[in-house]
Image (cartoon, rainbow, N blue to C red):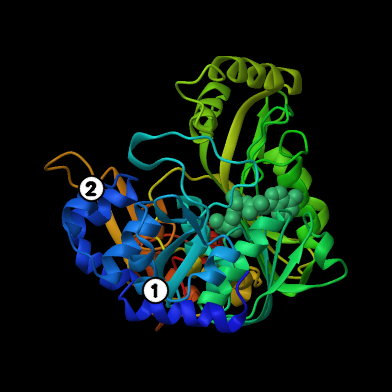
Amino acid sequence: MLDRAQASALADHLRSAGYTLEDVSDRLGSEATDALARNTTVAARDALGGADDPQANLVRLFLLHDTLTPDAAGAALGDLAPLEGTGIVARTGDGVRAGLEIRPYAAAGAGVDFSGWIANDLIPILDGRLDRSRPDYVLGASPASTTLAQMTIRRPVGRALDLGTGCGIQSLLLAGHAEHVVATDLNPRALRVAALTAGLNGLDLDLRQGSLYEPVAGEEFDLVVTNPPYVMSPPTGERLVYREGVLPADELVRRVVVEGASHLAPGGVLQVLGNWATTDDEPWVDRLRDWIGPTGCDALVLEREHLDPYEYIEVWLNDAGLVGTDAYLPRYRAWVGYFDALGITGVGMGWIMLHRAGRPTPDVHMEEWPHAVHQPLGEAFEAHLAGVGLAGSSDAELLGRAWRLDERVDVETLGRPGAEDPEHIVYRQRYGFGRAVEVDTALGAVLGACDGDLTAGQVIGAVASILDVDADALAAEITPRLRRLVAEGYLA
Ligand SMILES: C[S@@+](CC[C@H](N)C(=O)[O-])C[C@H]1O[C@@H](n2cnc3c(N)ncnc32)[C@H](O)[C@@H]1O
């Protein structure tokens, strides 16, 4: 790839042409920007009209996949020789085309501010085209990358690992709060592309090639993030390295989780986006408990979606560009046969977080959570760690603390119009996971009075006397629920 000076010179050209996310979005306007996000170019072509300046030409070259004249390419990019030598652009009979995309990218909020560029392979799906990707295709920022980036806990750490870095997107963001970032990938092309991404953004990444944790044997990390190739597909030699491994069913995700635990430093956190198989004999929670239990780590697992085999297979046949081709039905059949042979009757998709908390009895919490959440979720995952720590206190400690109900919790009451009392009282988070909990009158009254002044024990005593019930009995009833509400981030 480009050396450091060449990458920095290229970044200077991109910057001085105004090829940044903000400037390009301003130039194209919201309709064309949104259309490009839907992989259609017509609106952007309309927005650019006949303009022939470097910014317009960089958009044409890298985002619309147009051919530029050598003069226009040179004016936008400077010396083309190193870019041709490294496959970033290619000279064709009629001009200069992109060999890779260089996309302006920015991430704001989520505890990390970043603005720069990401390099990745040319997307094969512009303007309704559905070309097949090369097996070693290097994916750019995808919705899954964004989800992982938004759920990553952004506290300052020493060593971070981005397993399966692809275009390098997670590493770019990790570099904002980690002293040292190791980025690994099985695919050597991905590492070259990630090196370009790093170079354009002036970052030092420790890039290493190899499968799973092989490149970091014996090393520990404070934070490991990964969006691994979790797609479960038949071993027919048509695999795309960015999305599917060679291990059967969900074995790759299992290894990411189980082996990842042994690479966590004390207090370290592993955050994984994954798929897991379900079978008729094994509910998903049992399967994941078998993975996680032996690690001794605390865990939070949220199943966001559950697909039946047909839905799942169709998603990934579509992603591979097989719709409308002769290969579609045979591949579909082979995939169904593969699932049948493994007894897979459904696929769960979701988020796994492990925490090497060193607790004698680890806190492992798993649930189906298909509801809307409030991204970015990094803060909610971090609050979960803190909440579980606090919730681990003894009953006496829990009751001896003054808790404050988060100010972003709303109360909803539901009942018949004119009824004296509501039938349901729900406390709902306007933040993080957007949890909701139904409470009875006593718990509702206790929560409503948690303003950080009185201890929980005092609040329960006061509520007991208003309701004319025994205070000790009420405390015994409410304490376990209070513990869960602390772990779930209602109370701080
Ligand atoms: C879904 S992409 C994720 C890329 C990027 N981290 C992101 O968040 O967008 C998965 C990446 O894992 C890499 N990969 C595939 N098999 C792997 C393995 N056995 N070990 C490490 N990386 C692997 C792929 O080459 C690809 O870059």
* Residue 226 pos. (x, y %): 63, 58
- Quickly name the residue at label 2: 421
Outermost residue, right direction? 218
Nearer-the-camera pick, 218 or 204: 204
How many numbered marks have been drawn onto this rendered protein structure? Answer: 2
Residue 406, quarter of the rendered image: bottom left
Residue 389, quarter of the rendered image: bottom right
For the residue labelled by badge 2, is the local secondary structure a helix, a strand or a loop?
loop
Nearer-the-camera pick, 313 or 258: 313
User: How many other residues sit within 10 Å of disc 1, few (<14), some (14-19) or many (≥20)?
Assistant: few
* Residue 430 pos. (x, y %): 33, 61
* Residue 133 badge: none
Q: How far apart are marks 2 and 1 (CA)?
A: 42 Å
Q: Which residue is drawn at 46% across and 42% down?
A: 124
Nearer-the-camera pick, 273 or 116: 116
- Quickly name the residue at label 1: 109
Residue 134, quarter of the rendered image: top right
* Residue 181 pos. (x, y %): 66, 76
Q: Quadrant of the N terminus?
A: bottom right
Q: Indicate whether 432 appears above or below 283.
A: below
Name which residue type carries label 2: Asp
Q: Residue at x 35, y 60 (%)?
A: 69
Q: Indicate whether 398 appears above or below 346.
A: below
Asked whether the beta carbons under mark 2 and mark 1 sit within 8 Å of each other, the answer is: no
Horizontal side, residue 212 vs residue 441: left or right: right
Name which residue type carries label 1: Gly
User: How many other residues sit within 10 Å of disc 2, few (<14), some (14-19) or many (≥20)?
Assistant: few
